[in-house]
């Protein structure tokens, strides 16, 4: 069995895949009969009715310190269309705070420019071996995005292809939960802060050393062809949608991605090592009197290094809030 050794890094809290998925017209350039349908944006009527969406998804924590209440909310970076709009408890939490915080505010033009600049293939950079270049081209054709990834660094081409692998099952980065919340915050004039920088996120995905870049491409191509990797992602997003916190907390035992020292080191670098700085940023905002709705990837919320326990160590009272899914 091809185990998902080194689960796709985009699952571990990276938002580049949503950035590439926000231009569905370009991504659907090969619109053949067997291609997944391009994402259909919500209509004005659907957005107006969004205030009546009855069901919440995901996981929410209430954090309190100095008499002020903020919130942590776990997201996923690819989802189903019907999950993209928040339910009543998440809407109420966003309405109760002074600002929203995300890993990156992808509706900020400066953030977007910096991401896109860092994503471009370097002029004169090393070329991929013919075998890997051919695999990427074939995978892009199969994903119906042939030509639309040209010009990106090879590692990001593969990350994007992996992120699109479950579109035929209805899971699409275009419906990433962060995106809907960002649009909601912007539309209501809620100030947004980025907890990280584009450069920090890109450093987790791209490599200046040719050997490291090639290793990342090969790992991504293995994941792209792995049924086990897809099964892990499907279980992860189902856990999120159904608020199965116990199973999420046991992620390391079933993902097949933390079985070796190398796997664990990669997970630490791409998830756990980022949490203290994000927690410090949230705590600093709260300390200045600004209550915060902080929405970050679900894997940042679990385990001893997760944000709920990080905030508890910083003197916050932390309470998990079960969401009403009826």
Image (cartoon, rainbow, N blue to C red):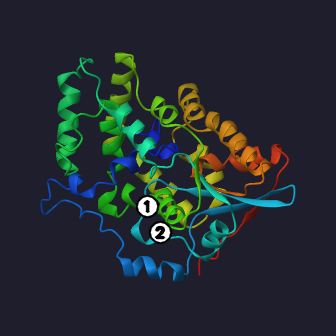
Q: Mark 2 points at which residue?
A: 83
Specify the quadrant of the image occupied by residue 67. bottom right
SS at circle 2: helix
Q: Which of 282 and 125 is in front in this view?
A: 282
Sort mark 2 into few (<14), some (14-19) or many (20+) by Cα contacts within 10 Å. Answer: some
Q: Which of 242 and 99 is in front in this view?
A: 99
Name the residue at the front extreme: 189
Residue 57 place in picture, x, y as percent: 56, 68
Q: Can residue 227 be seen in this view?
A: no
Residue 161 place in picture, x, y as percent: 30, 44
Identify which residue is drawn at 46% across, 53% down.
77
Q: Which mark is residue 49?
A: none
Q: Is 122 situated left or right of 246 in this image?
A: left
Sort mark 1 into few (<14), some (14-19) or many (20+) by Cα contacts within 10 Å. Answer: many
Mark 2 and mark 1: Cα distance apart in space: 7 Å
Q: Is residue 227 above or below residue 257?
A: below
Query: How many numbered callouts?
Result: 2
Q: Is 170 situated left or right of 312 in this image?
A: left
Quadrant containing the N terminus is: top left
Residue 192 place in picture, x, y as percent: 57, 53
Q: Is residue 203 above or below residue 174?
A: above
Specify the quadrant of the image occupied by residue 303. top right
Q: Mark 1 points at which residue?
A: 79
Quadrant containing the C terminus is: bottom right
SS at circle 1: loop
Q: Can residue 114 be seen in this view?
A: yes
Identify which residue is drawn at 74% across, 44% down.
284
């Amino acid at each position: 069995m091809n185990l998902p050794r080194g689960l796709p890094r985009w699952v571990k809290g990276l938002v580049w895949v949503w950035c590439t998925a926000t231009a569905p017209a370009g991504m659907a350039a090969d619109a053949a009969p067997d291609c997944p349908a391009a994402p259909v944006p919500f209509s004005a009527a659907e957005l107006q009715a969004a205030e009546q969406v009855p069901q919440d998804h995901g996981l929410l924590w209430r954090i309190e310190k100095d008499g002020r209440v903020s919130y942590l909310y776990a997201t996923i970076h690819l989802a189903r269309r019907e999950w993209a709009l928040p339910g009543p408890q998440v809407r109420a939490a966003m309405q109760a705070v002074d600002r929203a915080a995300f890993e990156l505010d992808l509706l900020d033009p400066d953030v977007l420019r910096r991401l896109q600049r860092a994503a471009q293939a370097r002029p004169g950079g090393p070329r991929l071996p013919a075998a890997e270049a051919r695999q990427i081209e074939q995978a892009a054709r199969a994903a119906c995005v042939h030509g639309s990834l040209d010009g990106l660094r090879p590692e990001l081409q593969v990350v994007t292809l992996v992120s699109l692998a479950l579109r035929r099952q209805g899971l699409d980065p275009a419906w990433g939960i962060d995106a809907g919340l960002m649009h909601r915050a912007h539309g209501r004039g809620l100030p947004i802060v980025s907890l990280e920088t584009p450069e920090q996120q890109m450093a987790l995905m791209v490599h200046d050393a040719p050997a490291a870049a090639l290793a990342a491409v090969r790992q991504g191509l293995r994941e792209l062809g792995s049924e086990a990797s897809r099964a892990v992602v499907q279980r992860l997003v189902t856990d999120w949608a159904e608020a199965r916190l116990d199973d999420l907390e046991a992620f390391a035992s079933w993902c097949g991605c933390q079985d070796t020292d190398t796997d664990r080191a990669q997970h630490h670098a791409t998830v756990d090592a980022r949490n203290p700085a994000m927690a410090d940023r949230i705590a600093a905002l709260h300390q200045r009197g600004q209550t915060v709705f902080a929405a970050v990837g679900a894997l940042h919320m679990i385990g001893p290094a997760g944000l709920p326990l990080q905030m508890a160590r910083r003197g916050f009272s932390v309470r998990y809030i079960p969401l009403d899914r009826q």
